[in-house]
Image (tube, rainbow, N blue to C red):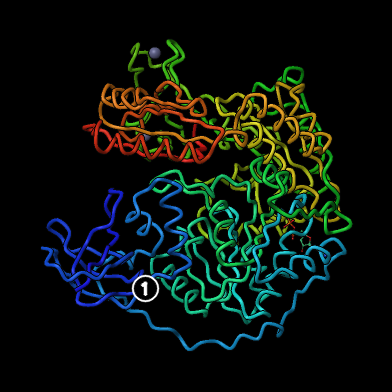
Amino acid sequence: MYILNVAIDVPLYKLFSYNHVSKLAIGTRVKVHFATKEVVGFVLGYEQDNALHNLKPILEVYPEILDSEVLQLIRFCSQYYHYPIGQTVMQAVPKYYRQTEIINYKFKQPRNVIVGENIVNVVILNKEQQYIVNNISQHFNEFYPSLLYGITGSGKTEVYMELIYNCLLNDQQALVMVPEINLTPQLLERFINRFPTVNIKIMTSQVTNRERLKAYVEAEAGEANIIIGTRLSIFTPFKNLGLIIVDEEHDLSFKQNDNLRYHARDLAVFRARIANCPLVLGSATPSIETLYNYQQGKYHYYKLSNRANTNAVLPTIKIVDTNIYSDKAGLTSVALEMLNECLKNNELSLVFINRRGYAPIVCCNDCGYVVTCANCSVNMVYHSVTRDLKCHHCGVSNDIPKYCPQCNSTNLSAVGLGTQKIEELLKKQLPHARVYRIDQDTLVSKKSWIELYKKINNHEIDILIGTQILAKGHDFANLTLVICLAIDNGLYSHDFRSSEYLYAQLTQVSGRAGRSDKKGTVLLQTSNPNHPIYHYLFNNDFNGFVNEILAKRYVLQLPPYTYYAMLRVSGKSMNKVMDCLYQVAAIHVNDKDIVVYPPLPAIIQRLKNKERGQLLITSINRDKLHRYIDLIQFQLQHKIKPKQVSWLIDVDPFEL
Ligand code: ADP
Ligand code: ZN
Ligand code: ZN
């Protein structure tokens, strides 16, 4: 008899033992009894043992076996993020794998892939691009990580596609990871045009479970040649993975902020190492972590310093001080004039509103009360189309209250600068302009993107108004003016990374301007024009900006010079949450390299009806930090055993 050790979807840091007459391959999907249920598990170990153990038997053996490379990644992930192994496996596989049913999946007739055929839109690479492609292509079949730093529009995507082409010629597969918001129909179309006879599959949280399964299975069988996906695609099995690309590697969406709190870019480095393949981390504003790794000699470095379209140059940055040019309504007179000028020239402009931590709220004009969500400690956001209030955290919507709950006044109104408010203002100030507003509320489907592009190409729009959703990835040829509003919010934050985020975001959105023959202009409206970040943006001096940040981080001993982990506790009662945190904080630390900060309520203290608290632990030594987390976990499970709260560890946290 054999004892099989099986990973099951439960929040426990161990495997469970079952009996079976034979051994099974590591990674085999099985059905077992657990508690009173029949559940799916994955065999992660076995030993031969003829002694009688009262173990339950394996109920069913399914044909699926997890790919060994993916398994290695899962084990690493479970260890590094201190997340239960069974739950890690379940996060990594498609939903069908988690169900106690036979997976019916039939391949279509495999296609004949002829890479070189039918390519219509091949761009002739410029010298810089060709140099990069040639260099990286010499390192297929070895671990070769590089940072590709290229300003917006410098032709990074063309470099990716040429590298993928070479990878396919080697009969290998490519994984392209992009932020969710960047996977636009336009990008997909570029790939399809470039590789018309190649099997390209999409893997995002947006695709159906069936489609995800299909992409997963086809990649595993070597049928899918290119997988384009968001962070979860890092867990895709490949028959012969030859190249990994992480586009916009600095993007926050690569970090998952619930359950398994992994960072897909960091996992991509591990994956490329075990797959023995080149990895390209591309960005116009690489993350501080990646730049630091490069400085440490961990990555190769390639740079694209000019816009690929030789007529297109980087836009001119202008800064307008809102203290001088009053902007009571949100737009300065300077901005309005420039919009008007653009309108006269029949050019497209974009008004970008940074909504990070900023949205219209409803408040009482008599006592200052602001309407907050009953489940979460955040302000409700006013939506003028539906004329109601929505919580952007839990999704609850409510009518606007008739009376102030605090002072009974009826004098309630919406304040703040939202896209809708700017739309109303522009329609009043520039009545001839055809204004088109886009944000998550108005634009969700692929069809509406296609319609938007059509409208823009037919010159049916003069001014676009939008948020983050418009900042990235889009290529509107006639766009010459970008006006950025409410950007200062990004400066006043508790988060030490906030100016880095703001720099990346403004660079991204500025990069939309002047992508073809007409030179672009970007106007930044700020009440803080002397802030150093605007100086660096104005001079397009990303290196200077990064050096300043790294110097500050060094002095303050912040990441990447130290390592962070956050213990997050939540529950119905704040007392119980804090009590748990204080017990952990009291665990004796016998090492000056470990710093445990005092417990604190989370920034959003109440979320979806749960109170939340956190404990920050830092160390200059990564291994020591991990050993200390092990100790905390042990104490939580076996000594503290907190009641009515749940806890988790967030390694390399981004939410502080
Ligand atoms: P990035 O990914 O760096 O933003 P893209 O690859 O999207 O840049 O390129 C920006 C624009 O320049 C695109 O319209 C692209 O087709 C064009 N382009 C890229 N490389 C070249 C090239 N070598 N010659 C001509 N046009 C190019
Ligand atoms: Zn009031
Ligand atoms: Zn809420």
Q: Quadrant of ligand 3?
A: top left
Which is nearer the eye, 155 or 190? 155
The residue at 58%/59% (across/down) is: 177
Q: Is residue 145 above or below residue 466?
A: below
Indicate the amino acid at tag 1. Ile
- Which image quarter: residue 581? top left
Q: Position of residue 232 (x, y in %)?
A: 48, 58
Q: Is residue 429 left or right of residue 621?
A: right
Q: Is residue 378 visible?
A: no
Q: Quadrant of residue 644?
A: top left
x%, y% of residue 524? 74, 32
Which of the two residues, 303 or 187, is positioned nearer the viewer here? 303
Residue drawn at x 56%, y 57% is 268
Q: Secondary structure at mark 1?
A: strand
Q: Position of residue 464 (x, y in %)?
A: 66, 45
Q: Is residue 230 visible?
A: yes
Q: Left or right of 343: which side holds 262?
A: left
Q: Residues within 10 Å of mark 1 (few under 14, many from 20)?
A: some
Q: From the viewer's perspective, tell me whether residue 249 is left or right of residue 567.
A: right
The residue that appears at 72% across and 80% down in the rendered structure is 119
Q: Nearer the viewer, residue 396 or 503?
A: 503
Residue at 53% in and 31% down: 357
Residue at which label 1 appears: 65
Query: Does 44 sit above or below residue 456?
Result: below
Is the N terminus in the top left, top right, bottom left or bottom right quadrant? bottom left
Picture coordinates of residue 439, whole percent (x, y):
55, 45
